[in-house]
Image: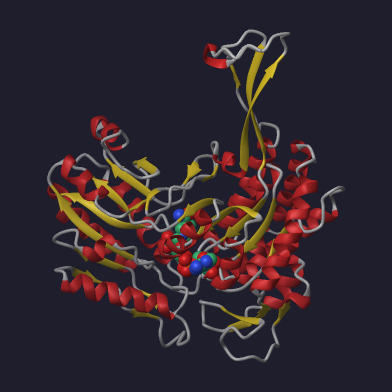
Amino acid sequence: MHNIQTLLTDLGVPSAAYNAAYNATDNATQNGLAVHSPIDGSRLGVVHAASAEDMRAAVGHAQTAFLAWRQVPAPRRGELVRLFGAELRRHKASLARLVAIEAGKVSSEGEGEVQEMIDICDFAVGLSRQLHGLTIASERPGHRMMEQWLPLGVVGIISAFNFPVAVWAWNATLALVCGNSCVWKPSEKTPLTALATQALFERALLQFDGAPAHLSQVLNGAAPVGEAMVDDHRVALISATGSTRMGRAVGPRVAARFGRCLLELGGNNAIIVSPSADLELAVRGILFGAYGTAGQRCTTTRRVIIHTSIHAELLARLERARASLCIGNPLEMGTLIGPLIDQAAFDAMQTALEAARAQGGEVSGGGRALAQQYPGAWYAEPALVRMPAQTDVVKQETFAPILYALPYDTLEEAIALHNDVPQGLSSAIFTNDLREAEIFISAVGSDCGIANVNIGTSGAEIGGAFGGEKETGGGRESGSDAWRAYMRRATNTINYSRSLPLAQGVKFDI
Ligand code: NAD
């Protein structure tokens, strides 16, 4: 129905990796993983599902690849990523369409996701000539002290359905220029985009001389395949993106074997709107943040904290705009809100709305949409919920388009409400008051990894470090100095004198 075969062929996915005619039941079978489109619930095909044993073998291959790749000069490693970026540029439209079909993103967001991959490739290529350490003054005469950043090992990447390819690219491009090999366990809901990305990477490899086999592998499957990677001591870093529930399972298992973990987990992001805010700007920022991607971004705006003096006016504007948002097939022009990923997501949304009502909330929207047109898919009207207080349900991340609105009187109160949730990913304030803006991003303001002024909570650029605090997991990916997570630091002291002075003046004369 979605012409998947043509897309996959264009992207170079071998037909053996994907079998549209596979005749299994709807669920994952022993070695098959059924793929559905959230657009209409149609079955896109079946991909091979790896076993835990396959994963262990893949990690072994990745370890061998690492031993060779770490010796390739970093700028040369960057050349491979440059070639991969060129493949992405060439195939942007096809990969973006596949993202839209498999994850249900509207077309411009599918394209944005692939653009993000291209951007991080460019960033990683530049970085491949900038993996720098410090030279530090030594207290001893004739000595030099310095830091080196060295390749780490096998990097295991676990990704979520809602950014099926960009998050892998954030990790893999940096990991590769840093001299590591990669093994990817994508979301079981989006295996086709993963296969397509791997195929494009392999096209880049064909144009590159000197990369070891198995430098970057993908293994589809559900959580147990990920668990096999998590428990494997040969995987130096597990970079896992997904729910806090997943992070709670993964983090301690990696810690138990003293592995390194980079966790990018759930968010519960808020925007504060102060009396001086430009309301036109605020409405647009809130709408995209709350309802874009059908509320299925880790950085989705889930709470808006509004000063009582503008509470009624802003809510009236938001309500008007909310009710007019175009819900529909994400491949069609003009659609702003696509489907939820599956029925479980829709059910979770309904459960949260019921809880909100029971906790004093007044709900607009939130019902099922387009049920007649797409009986096998799960579209939802975006919901706006006026809450009298920040109750339990507001403190949870429900991965759906629900925006809770809360009133406040003083900025201190707004910041306290803002920070009083377990998650700490993204945040924003809309204000034209310089003092309020500075307080919000200061030590006494937002406790999140991302704090914005006069822009929403979602849609980060790749140049900055991305990630959050508290139950969001503490990891940082993408820009700035996030590359350091993919390297090990060695401190070197070099003695070029003819004596052996000890540090701190210690004497040990023989
Ligand atoms: P999920 O936690 O259900 O799954 C994410 C990935 O983890 C999948 O590949 C899954 O197979 C794997 N997994 C689950 N349990 C595992 C285990 N015990 N061991 C190893 N692997 C395991 O998340 P989802 O529904 O795909 O994505 C939505 C969630 O991801 C939301 O909570 C969202 O906020 C979060 N997310 C966070 C970020 C971020 O950067 N902070 C980005 C995107 C999504």
Q: Is residue 87 above or below residue 373?
A: above
Residue 70 in the image, given as x and y percentages of width and height:
75, 43
- The structure residue drawn at horizontal position 64% and vertical position 72%, both measured from the top left corner, is 52
For image coordinates 78% across by 53% down, the residue present is 65
Taking the spot 44% from the left edge, 73% from the top edge, the residue there is 340
Whether 228 is drawn above or below 26: the answer is: above
Q: Nearer the viewer, residue 449 or 133?
A: 133
Residue 371, given in percent of the width and then of the height, sits at 40, 85
- The reply to whether residue 365 is visible in this rendering is no
Q: How is the image coloured?
A: secondary structure
Q: Quadrant of the C terminus?
A: top right
For the N terminus, the quadrant is: bottom right
Is residue 233 rendered to the left or right of residue 412? right
Horizontal relation, residue 346 to residue 392: left or right: right
Residue 417 visible from this viewpoint: yes
**How many numbered marks appear?**
0
Name above or below for residue 195 compared with residue 442.
below
For this view, does 347 lie left or right of residue 165?
Answer: left
Residue 417 in picture, x, y percent from top left: 21, 50
Residue ranking furthest to the right: 209
> Can you give x and y, in whole percent of width and height, for residue 490 in the image?
63, 32
